[in-house]
Amino acid sequence: MKTVHLIQHTHWDREWYFTENDSRTVLYYFMADVIARLEADESLGPLVLDGQTVVLEDYFQVAPDNRERVLKLIAAGRLLIGPWYTQTDFLVVGAESITRNLLLGMADCQTLGSRMPVGYVPDSFGQSAQLPMFLAQFAIDRAVIWRGWCEHDVASSEFIWRSADGSSVTTAVLPWGYGCAKWLPTNAEEAWRVLPGILQKQAKFSASAQILLPNGNDQSPFEYGVPAMLDTLNEQQDEYRFVRSDFSRYFQALEGETLTEFQGELLSPKYMRIHRGIFSTRMDIKQANARLENFVSQQLEPLLSVVWRLGLPYPQTAVENIWREAMKSHAHDSIGGCNSDRVNAMVKARLTSGQESASQLFELNMKMLAEGIDARQQGKKIIIFNSLPYERDGRVALTLYVPGTDFCIVDASGQPCRWQIVHEEQQDMSVIVQELSNSTTTVWYRKCTLLLEAKALPACGYQTLYLQEDCAAGFVATSGEISALENAWLRLTLDEGQISLLDKRSGKRWEHILQLVDGGDAGDNYNYSPPEEDWRVTSDGALTSATWQRGTLADTLTLNWSIAAPVDQLARQQHLCNTQLNVSMTLALDHDCPLLDVQVSLDNTLRDHRLQVEIPTDIGEMFHFADQPFGLIRRENRPQTLAVWQQEQWTEAPASLWPMQSLVMMHNQSHGMCVVTEGLREYEIPADKPATLAITLLRSVGWLGQANMPWRPGRASGMVLPSPDSQLTGPFHCHFALLPLHQGPDATFWRDVENWRTPALGWLDSGWSRFKTNPHGKSFPSSYSLLSWDTPLHFSTLKKAQNGDALILRGWNPGTSLLSSAAPVAAGDITPVTLAETPLCAPQKTVSACAPVSWRIQPAKEGKSDA
């Protein structure tokens, strides 16, 4: 006899084709019904509240009077909550976001009374290979998932899933989804007509006699009559024994079973769609999210940590609120962009609002820091902040407003610093400075965007420079005509409109790099779909201008293309070029770094298309590498299952479209090519060009869902709703870099990657500010380092601990080799902790691939906490 574990639940999409306002209203009545029925019948329950505490946060906003009733049901184990704050995506959002999601979910569960000790992931569009690691760091050793699994990955639907760092969780798949047993009849005879078919499918790949029966669906009413109906069926048949259960009891019943082990990601869309296309849908939302995640975790929180140790308050609740609002945009539909236009606007608004709050916190803390620094030189203070935990030289982007032609920037000893102007324009200061807004006289200044050379920046700290107006620069600026971008490592040339790049170290030359390729997209917000007969246009022959510029710190080449292109899908079918795609690309080669910086700007006038930049690698390997949360993953260039997906009638094609955090590369022992991006999350290995990295810059579609697409046959995903905003017409900008590899990804290569991804930031104390604060009366040094951690690990964050007056410092192994790990050098007690910020027994002397390392730094003298 098989044991069937009834799991009553709800799956709660906060937004999708409806808004969060809609779902919150429905939630009010859903929860009122659940509470009343659980209180009236003590035999009912438990009910799984979708594994995310934000459901209750939303509910308490509209029904605060019911809080105690809910807490009583949680304490009795009849409402199961957590472990997540929101049901996050795992392939598009960043590692710190996933960590904070569990951290805040755990904090909510502690406040509300209990935590479901199962990593419940019912609807993520594919599963990260790092999920077991994240769960293990939070003392969770069991997971329930849907989407991405099939028997080509692991034969059974229950298995031991290991991450590359050795962490493991016992995992159960919902092979037919969380809604496979929704809306069951409450009459036993009627239910028995449908249940055997459901149970046979559920048990098809099972390694045991234990079967999960998830009973619930999207925003669907509590099916309170089902348990009694199953009790009746227990009396009428002996093939199955139905039990009122939960995931913990199910896993207890699995104990003793011998389960297969599996390591890797789960991205197979055989039985359920994973929507290979959301990685590039609404690229503006992807960029906004990456910008916010990186700024908060790698710039704002480290700055707040530094000034907190200097005596200023740490606004912990304000920062936590930024994270919570961002995570409301991290669910699979939300960050995927597969929503109605109204919802996508709300998703982007949350991220934009978070960026505004984070930027203002950064601005005000820089202002307070500058206020306390005793000047060493004449002039306005420029603070250069280095969040990375090691001393470094850097190139700093800085915007200055100066009244005259000449100015000088000097260090604390009065020595001039070198800089070059990247862009300059006139600025009416009355639109920036509140004090001038009511003036009858226009005050014009030069607005100069600079690239500034900063030397010996303190580890996790700052140094002070000084802007001296109406003074000579103090160095001889480099300028003149050039015909190539060249430094000690690289040489870039332009020949008949085609770009070539030479790596002088290996002698390897790549021809025709950075080709723009625009093709049709007959897909929707869920999936890219090639038209049945695509017609692609490229940047070849469309170059209108090329401007070379020699600079003091970097040389640049600016290219402008006007590409004749079809305006929409109909024109593409007719091979009719009836509009222009105008694209500008600025290539910058630093004099002191083997890295090519690329900025692309365009005016998107096309619809139903996909724009990629193709970068040949000339690597003959069958695999490549991309980054994933806290690690690197190796993938096949061409998935083997492409040979069988149509024959086996998969739900969508396992196309060679892949997610990345920010990096993808192909290499062998002698040479290779790496692309690092700022917010671009998708790349493709084209079937006809297996040695090419095609980075998706922009994807434009006009529908939320469509049916019968070549790579996704059958029904429409989501709703068949027009989504004109997803065409993303108008200005678009993106930023990435090329790093040629020489003899593989060594320590120098990884240091160059990290320095590009996490630049030092500059801030000018102009004396003008939109907001005024009273003097704090504190005094700060002109240069300061909070701590030092000179490690090959990559920096992830420095933040205040979730609990207590301490700091959390985190890094991770970016490569595939074992790295040594020394403790950071800082004042106070330093102890190793998990991502959950709980103590470890002993520090890690070595760090495996795909592993994070966290340290708790308890100050010797207690600082001030949240003000």
Image (cartoon, helix red, strand yellow):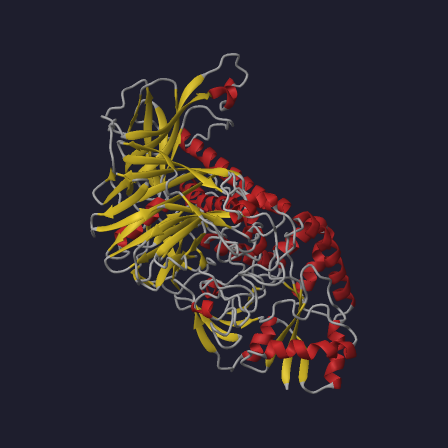
**Of 25 and 666, the residue lying toward us:** 666
Residue 109 in the image: above or below residue 329: below
**Of 76 and 118, the residue lying toward us:** 118
Residue 403 in the image: above or below residue 352: above
Please name the residue shown 46% across and 16% down the image. 443
Query: For this view, does 658 lie left or right of residue 759?
Result: right
Residue 676 in the image: above or below residue 775: below
Residue 759: quarter of image? top left
Query: For this view, does 55 lie left or right of residue 815?
Result: right
Q: Where is residue 617 in the image (x, y as percent from the top left)?
A: 31, 54
Q: Where is residue 178 in the image (x, y as percent from the top left)?
A: 62, 67
Q: Where is residue 314 in the image (x, y as percent from the top left)?
A: 48, 42
Q: Where is residue 697 in the image (x, y as percent from the top left)?
A: 45, 46
**Of 786 and 404, the residue lying toward us:** 404
Instruction: Say how many tags the image has.
Output: 0
Please name the residue shown 27% across and 23% down the image. 473
Residue 490 can be seen, yes or no:
yes
Residue 790 can be seen, yes or no:
no
Query: For this view, does 457 lie left or right of residue 152?
Result: left
Q: Quadrant of the N terminus?
A: bottom right
